[in-house]
Amino acid sequence: MPGNSFGQAFRITTFGESHGIALGVIIDGCPPRLPLTAKDIQKELDKRRPGQKLTTSRQEPDKVEIISGIFEGETLGTPITLIIFNRDVDSSKYEPIKTIFRPGHGDFTYFKKYGIRDWRGGGRSSGRETVARVAAGAVAQRVLDTVGVKIYAYTVALGGIYAQECDLDFVENNLLFCCDKSVYPRMEQRILEVKKEGDSLGGIVEVRVKNCPCGLGEPVFDKLDAELAKALMSIGAVKGVEIGAGFKVADMLGSECNDEITPQGFASNNAGGILAGISNGDEIIIRAAVKPISSIEKEQRTITQDGNPTTISVKGRHDISAIPRIVPVCGAMVRLVLADYLLRQRMIGEKA
């Protein structure tokens, strides 16, 4: 099966290419009578919109248009189709390198798989594909609102600079969605320094889920944490995912790792809100390791489509880091998973 769809009860299918006419998403399974307008979706899209300070200079308004599934400010229960037209496409920088594989990109693997590829900005493998995910995530939040679930996504590391504290009030008040105002100026400065060097930066995004109902998740292969990891790993720039204490558990004793249970709840949260693949009612904490942007001006070795050795320096309008624009994408993917599992759980209850 082609991998363009995600979810079961709340299912999305995205479409479109980076330099094509438009990108969009079809959402199937959204319940009826949920309040939803284009303004609600646009609010999330604006968070990942290009053309802002510290991001690519590509000027895309990313204005969403609702094609179906919503009437008089409410969902109909029928498929919802959302479309975002590309308005500032410039493929000229890609013309000279259209037969050259860019290191770190999907150029090589897409060509080997399909025998053809859209060389204009990476086509379907471009990070621009995620605009459809963010739009769908805004719809998923309306499902989560019915049970009071709140999701927060923010930057905890960028270019080797790590947050020392987490201030959720600060997240929406800075350009990088950084959670620590004391390190934010250093992160911003680091981006400007690396931009001058023609290089790029990676980082870490953390997502917290508050008020998640206990009992979401399916044994054995559809564990909630497994699906969350899959959702985040499906984002092109993500190369690692950890939940709760993550890789630190490898150095712990069982007595240190186990979250003791009291009448008031769990005494700690090393499990990250998930036990045996099922939510335990505690705060879900998940982190995604984001690789540096692959398109850099520094000269690198590569080959052409004919297998001949060459070098490449990628010009054009590129981000220096996937952060901050990947932050709302990570939040959206978590929303999609939780909305899907919430509806699956309701279906089980209805059958019982």
Image (tube, rainbow, N blue to C red):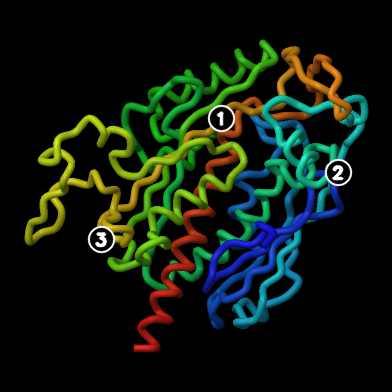
Q: What separation in Å lies between label 3 and label 1 (alpha carbons)?
A: 31 Å
Place of residue 351 in the rendered image (x, y in percent of width and height, measured from the top left): 39, 88
Callout 2 crowding tier (Cα within 10 Å): few <14, some 14–19, many ≥20: few
- Element type where label 1 sits in the image: loop
Place of residue 151 in the rendered image (x, y in percent of width and height, measured from the top left): 42, 54
Q: Are marks 1 and 2 in contact (CB under 8 Å)?
A: no
Q: Are marks 2 and 3 in contact (CB under 8 Å)?
A: no
Q: What separation in Å lies between label 1 and label 2 (alpha carbons)?
A: 26 Å
Place of residue 85 in the rendered image (x, y in percent of width and height, measured from the top left): 81, 54
Callout 1 crowding tier (Cα within 10 Å): few <14, some 14–19, many ≥20: many
Place of residue 290 in the rendered image (x, y in percent of width and height, measured from the top left): 53, 33
Q: Quadrant of the C terminus?
A: bottom left
Residue matched to label 2: 116
In primary-sequence order, the first of circles 1 and 2 is: 2
Tally of marks: 3
Q: Amino acid at mark 1?
A: Lys
Q: Residue 291 shows which numbered tag?
A: 1
Q: What separation in Å lies between label 2 and label 3 (alpha carbons)?
A: 46 Å
In terms of image quadrants, where is residue 73?
bottom right
In terms of image quadrants, where is residue 308?
top right
In primary-sequence order, the first of circles 3 and 1 is: 3
Q: Residue 280 shows which numbered tag?
A: 3
In primary-sequence order, the first of circles 2 and 3 is: 2
The answer to which of 263 and 242 lies nearer the viewer is 242
* Residue at (26, 33) in percent of width and height: 250
The answer to which of 178 and 258 lies nearer the viewer is 258
Query: Mark 1 or mark 2: which is in front?
Result: 2
* Residue at (64, 62) in percent of width and height: 5
- Element type where label 3 sits in the image: loop
